[in-house]
């Protein structure tokens, strides 16, 4: 097994974060009752015609620029013809001959070091509808809501050799897309889907082996498992004198295995030809410059700025920028409360812990910057202590509640009134006369016990430092 | 250009058409004849010519990214031959 | 007098003056259809009730000043591949037999805004594929000049309706001559505008890069008036030209002194009927007498136009017609297996000619043949376009026959599809190059059948061809010389 190497290229389909579909004014919102986000155009009714959403072109160009691609200045759409119920026109408007971006690449870093993964091309196309199996009547229901949602397909060169490299590439790509704001990249909702082209060959061989295409992985973990399984399957085939068949396979993550998707009878001959219903694209130097100028701050720049502007350590800056959502949350909270270190701590420690515990992705964070800022404010002003703050944080992490109101309702506000605090100390001393006597007799370690009892008396809602001082003061009064 | 049985079968498969033997033979004959005529194009030298796929080239025609359509499911489903639960119905697609 | 003999804008004037009510005009038109359509079968659907309701609405609109166009109140037919909201639109195909679109084509909206009254959906070749109107699932249309003959196609129902007095004007579509050729065969006038002048939104596509909607009417002025109404930019069609409005009626009456007219010599080679040849050359002579400079020139690519046209049209059609699969609308064969559902729906839903073109188109795009056929055709198209550009550096317009013969007998053409395709020899190049062209009647042959002359303009040169056609029409006076009712006399006179 060790004498083989795996060669992997990826085709990543990304649903763009436009408000409307690529060729009509229907919403791209996820969900909705079946066929309620459709119109005669995306349903391909006879006589209807497509008109291109300008934003789609701008998002595609922005992605190309951020991945070091060349932008195709004269670019066109083509039709890809095939019959399937999720494709209402029986052709997909896509790009074959003149994809909008070509010849780019991004640098990834794994434990093995840094490496550039080439990007062969990026093209624009429309998404297909959804098929739902109906076991009751043994038929298939067709929902065209996703039909016509804009996609870009990012096709890498076969430059990856391991699971680590694939995951590093995908993570990097996803971050770029999220930072650009061109996609939310939610794998669960299908807005970020990777197909794996994989082949194996003897180490040192120049020729590529026969490759398979693997579809239907909906998490990075599933991708890793699918790669492991497929390289094993191929190496076993080749080792035993068999050969790999060029085919499309479907990954079944539940069973941790894959199976061939289409029968050979359905020969793939897509009969691509130039789409006659759309105008050609001419992407001028000025337009590219305009898109470039609007490019938001990407991760590397952000990291550097955090270190410089907020004096955040490199390691922390890296974690804070590891998702766009987290970075946005950080900046927006700092904007409100002006406490970068404190905000960073909450995100680095408590947020990361809760994300791990709940198995959530950072992009799914519900936490609102205003809430976190209020929480920090409450600590700073001494209204709650850190123990209480942690409890409140868990609450605002999970639910959209008002932290101040929550604290009031639950009676978590700290006792600030000196008189009340002193009374508590007195009650504790009254109940623990022996301990007080012991302290006065020289047993200094009793001090801690008395402080603890006072905190308990106050149900933890007091500043420990202050309680400390008051106990000390009371003991001194006893000495006198 | 003469069309073979295999080619006709392939075309019919791609175009999702069913042809009985008689139709197949007629299609073979007709299409061969038409393609034979089409082959006269080859007399015209087109080296160095850029193909033209549109009569008069329209360039950069866009729409703005603004939602203009609401829910028109009822209308869209009204002409569906078979429907259920707001969906179009086809014979099962999974194996 | 018979109201239905009036020209379209003439009727429009009468209505505006209050000499005829819209309801009277519509009722007269419906009565004529009732009487004649049994014989000619120009319509797939007649909008009897709708037209009468609309008549009253238009009458009120004219009074209130809402409708001011010259065709306000005029009954107009629309080819049945143009979508009409709430009215079935069949493309003369079984596969769309019951299709009722939830939207109207841009041209239908424009006609509506102009106050026209939609009188019916005209018969055609199935999916506009054919030159005879015999491939219609609903049966053939007959030529009003001789019912044993075809009206031409694919807009045969539209042209025949205008000729027979079953519509004042009609809207057709022209992919390779489908407005001009039936106009020629039926002795009426038809314009195929520059690609992009009329929105294709709502026109059920045959070959998207060639399709263009155009008017058919009894004279040049009517055609110009209708074209003015239906033309102009539409943001729903990406290939629509930017100009918002066109004005054709103003220029129409100017003379043609000094206009340079080129005649492609090879349009007059073998295969051209002698009567047609003589009539067209006579027409050229008339234009010369009106002050035009007419001369012959060589065009080398004529013989390549049909091959290139059929490759491109069939390729696009094979893709455009793939959506008819029995899932979303239209005919569906009862089948339990998806593959069989597709195949049976399409095999039973499409007629023979449509299937033939789908197969040719599928073949020329298929793996291994794309370069030799499809891409070659695109290059030939480039050469043809270039040759027209060169011609228009010397001439304002080009003149030739619309079709090589007059209308053939019913049933003759379909026996040999290739022979039928060759009948498009003079019309298809215009679509490949996206140019405007008009067909005007210029005589009758020995059988008393109309002959059409085609004038071709440079891109957006509609005004030139309309002006030349009008000048010819005034000099030749076809409708005054010949009319369908006294056809026998003409034959004796020829």
Image: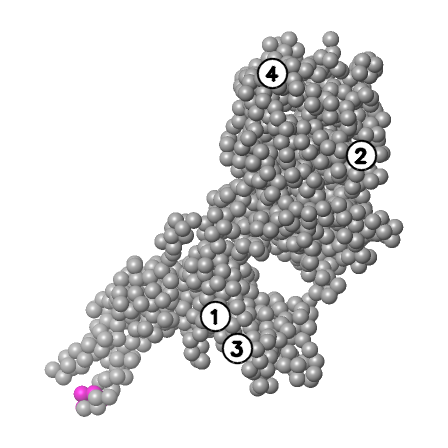
C179 on left or right of A281: right
Residues at marks 1 and 3, CA–CA distance in whole angstroms = 12 Å
User: To which chain does the residue with label 1 belong?
Assistant: A
Query: What range of the chain is rendered magenta?
Result: A437-441
Q: Tell me whether circle 1 and circle 2 mark residues in contact (CB < 8 Å).
A: no
Q: Secondary structure at mark 3?
A: loop
User: What's the mark number on residue C290?
Assistant: 4
Query: Which is in the foreground here, disc 1 or disc 3?
Result: 1
Disc 4 and disc 2 on one polypeptide chain? yes
Residue A438 within the magenta-colored segment of the rendering: yes
Chain containing the residue with disc 4: C
User: Callout 1: helix, strand or loop?
Assistant: strand
From what the image shows, is residue A196 above or below residue B23? below
Mark 4 or 2, which is nearer the eye? 4
Residue labelled with disc 2:
C134
- Residue closest to the eye, A176 or A338: A176
Report the magenta stretch's main SS: helix
Which residue is labeled 1 in the image?
Answer: A117
The image quadrant of residue C79 is top right
Q: Residue at x 68, y 15 (%)?
A: C476
* Camera-side mark, 3 or 2: 2
Residues at circles 1 and 3 in contact by the CB criterion of under 8 Å: no
Write down the residue under mark 3: A162
Marks 1 and 4 sit apart, C-alpha to C-alpha, by 72 Å
Q: Is C295 positioned to the left or the right of A27 in the image?
A: right
Residue C38, placed above or below residue C92: above
């Amino acid at each position: 097994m060790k004498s083989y190497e795996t060669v992997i290229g990826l085709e990543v389909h990304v649903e763009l974060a436009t408000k409307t579909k690529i060729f009509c004014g229907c919403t791209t919102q996820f969900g909705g009752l079946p066929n309620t986000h459709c119109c005669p155009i995306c349903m391909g009714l006879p006589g209807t015609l497509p008109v291109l959403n300008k934003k789609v072109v701008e998002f595609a160009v922005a992605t190309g620029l951020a991945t070091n691609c060349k932008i195709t200045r004269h670019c066109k759409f083509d039709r890809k013809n095939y019959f399937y119920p999720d494709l209402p026109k029986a052709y997909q408007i896509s790009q074959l001959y003149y994809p909008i971006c070509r010849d780019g690449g991004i640098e990834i870093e794994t434990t093995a070091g840094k490496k550039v993964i080439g990007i062969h091309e990026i093209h624009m196309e429309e998404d297909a509808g959804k098929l739902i199996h109906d076991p009751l009547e043994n038929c298939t229901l067709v929902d065209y809501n996703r039909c016509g949602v804009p996609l870009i397909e990012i096709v890498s060169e076969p430059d990856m050799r391991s699971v680590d490299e694939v995951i590093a590439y995908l993570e990097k790509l996803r971050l770029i897309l999220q930072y650009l704001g061109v996609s939310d990249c939610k794998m669960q909702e299908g807005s970020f889907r990777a197909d794996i082209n994989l082949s194996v060959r003897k180490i040192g061989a120049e020729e590529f082996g026969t490759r398979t295409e693997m579809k239907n992985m909906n998490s990075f973990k599933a991708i890793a498992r699918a790669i492991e399984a497929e390289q094993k399957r191929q190496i076993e085939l080749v080792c035993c004198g068999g050969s790999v068949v060029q085919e499309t396979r479907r990954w079944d993550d539940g069973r941790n295995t894959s199976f061939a998707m289409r029968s050979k009878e359905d020969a793939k001959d897509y009969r691509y030809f130039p789409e006659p219903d759309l105008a050609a694209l001419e992407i001028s130097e000025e337009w590219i410059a305009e898109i470039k100028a609007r490019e938001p701050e990407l991760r590397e720049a952000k990291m550097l700025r955090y270190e410089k502007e907020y004096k955040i350590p490199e390691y922390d800056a890296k974690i804070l920028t590891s998702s766009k959502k987290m970075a946005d949350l950080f900046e927006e909270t700092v904007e409100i409360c002006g406490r970068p270190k404190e905000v960073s701590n909450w995100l680095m420690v408590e947020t990361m812990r809760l994300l791990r515990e709940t198995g959530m992705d950072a992009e799914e964070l519900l936490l609102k910057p205003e809430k976190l800022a209020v929480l920090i404010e409450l600590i700073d002003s001494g209204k709650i202590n850190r123990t209480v703050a942690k409890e409140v944080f868990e609450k605002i992490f999970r639910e959209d509640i008002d932290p101040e109101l929550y604290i009031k309702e639950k009676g978590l506000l700290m006792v600030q009134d000196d008189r009340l605090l002193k009374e508590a100390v007195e009650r504790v001393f009254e109940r623990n006369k022996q301990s007080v006597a012991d302290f006065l007799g020289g047993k200094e370690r009793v001090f801690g016990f008395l402080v603890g009892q006072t905190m308990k008396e106050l149900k933890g809602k007091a500043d420990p430092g202050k309680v400390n001082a008051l106990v000390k003061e009371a003991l001194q009064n006893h000495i006198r | 250009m003469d069309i073979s049985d295999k080619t006709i079968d392939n075309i019919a498969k791609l175009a999702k058409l069913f042809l009985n033997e008689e139709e197949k033979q007629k299609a073979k004959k007709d299409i061969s004849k038409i393609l034979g005529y089409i082959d006269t194009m080859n007399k015209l030298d087109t080296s160095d010519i850029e193909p033209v796929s549109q009569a008069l080239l329209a360039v950069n025609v866009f729409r703005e990214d603004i939602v203009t359509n609401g829910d028109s499911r009822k209308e869209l489903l009204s002409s569906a031959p078979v429907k259920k639960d707001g969906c179009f119905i086809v014979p099962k697609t999974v194996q | 007098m018979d109201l239905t003999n009036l020209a379209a804008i003439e009727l429009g004037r009468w209505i505006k003056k209050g000499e005829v009510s819209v309801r009277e005009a519509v009722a007269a038109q419906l009565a004529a259809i009732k009487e004649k359509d049994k014989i000619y079968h120009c319509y797939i659907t007649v909008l009897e009730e709708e037209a009468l309701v609309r008549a009253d609405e238009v009458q009120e609109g004219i009074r209130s000043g809402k409708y001011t166009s010259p065709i306000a109140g005029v009954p107009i037919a629309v080819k049945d591949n143009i979508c009409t909201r709430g009215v079935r639109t069949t493309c003369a195909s079984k596969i769309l037999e019951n299709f009722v679109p939830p939207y109207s084509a841009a041209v239908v909206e424009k006609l509506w805004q102009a106050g026209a009254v939609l009188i019916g959906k005209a018969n055609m070749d199935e999916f506009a594929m054919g030159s005879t109107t015999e491939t219609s699932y609903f049966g053939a249309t007959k030529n009003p000049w001789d019912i044993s003959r075809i009206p031409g196609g694919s807009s045969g129902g539209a042209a025949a309706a205008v000729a027979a007095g079953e519509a004042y004007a009609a809207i057709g579509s022209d992919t390779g001559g489908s407005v001009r050729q039936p106009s020629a065969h039926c002795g009426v006038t038809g314009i195929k505008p520059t690609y992009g002048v009329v929105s294709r939104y709502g026109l059920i596509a045959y070959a998207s890069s060639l399709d263009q909607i155009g008017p058919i009417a009894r004279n040049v002025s009517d055609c110009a008036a209708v074209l003015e109404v239906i033309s102009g930019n539409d943001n729903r069609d990406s290939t629509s030209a930017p100009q918002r409005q066109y004005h054709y009626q103003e220029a129409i009456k100017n003379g043609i002194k000094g206009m340079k007219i080129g005649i492609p010599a090879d349009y007059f080679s073998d295969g051209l009927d002698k009567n047609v040849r003589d009539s067209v050359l006579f027409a050229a002579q008339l234009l010369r007498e009106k002050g035009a400079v007419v001369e012959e020139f060589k065009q080398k690519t004529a013989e390549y136009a049909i091959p290139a046209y059929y490759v491109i049209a069939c390729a696009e059609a094979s893709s455009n017609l793939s959506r008819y699969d029995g899932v979303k609308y239209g005919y569906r064969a009862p089948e339990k297996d998806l593959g069989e559902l597709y195949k049976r729906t399409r095999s039973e839903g499409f007629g023979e000619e449509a299937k033939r073109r789908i197969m040719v188109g599928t073949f020329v795009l298929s793996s291994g043949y794309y370069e030799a056929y499809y891409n070659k055709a695109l290059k030939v198209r480039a050469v043809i376009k270039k040759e027209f550009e060169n011609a228009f550096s010397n001439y304002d317009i080009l003149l030739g026959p619309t079709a090589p013969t007059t209308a053939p007998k019913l049933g003759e053409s379909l026996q040999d599809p290739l022979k039928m395709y060759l009948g498009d020899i003079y019309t298809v190049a215009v679509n490949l190059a996206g140019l405007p062209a008009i067909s005007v009647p210029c005589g009758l042959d020995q059988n008393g059948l109309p002959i059409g002359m085609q004038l071709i303009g440079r891109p957006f040169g509609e005004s030139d061809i309309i002006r030349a056609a009008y000048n010819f029409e005034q000099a030749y006076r076809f409708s005054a010389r010949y009319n369908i009712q006294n056809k026998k006399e003409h034959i004796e006179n020829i």
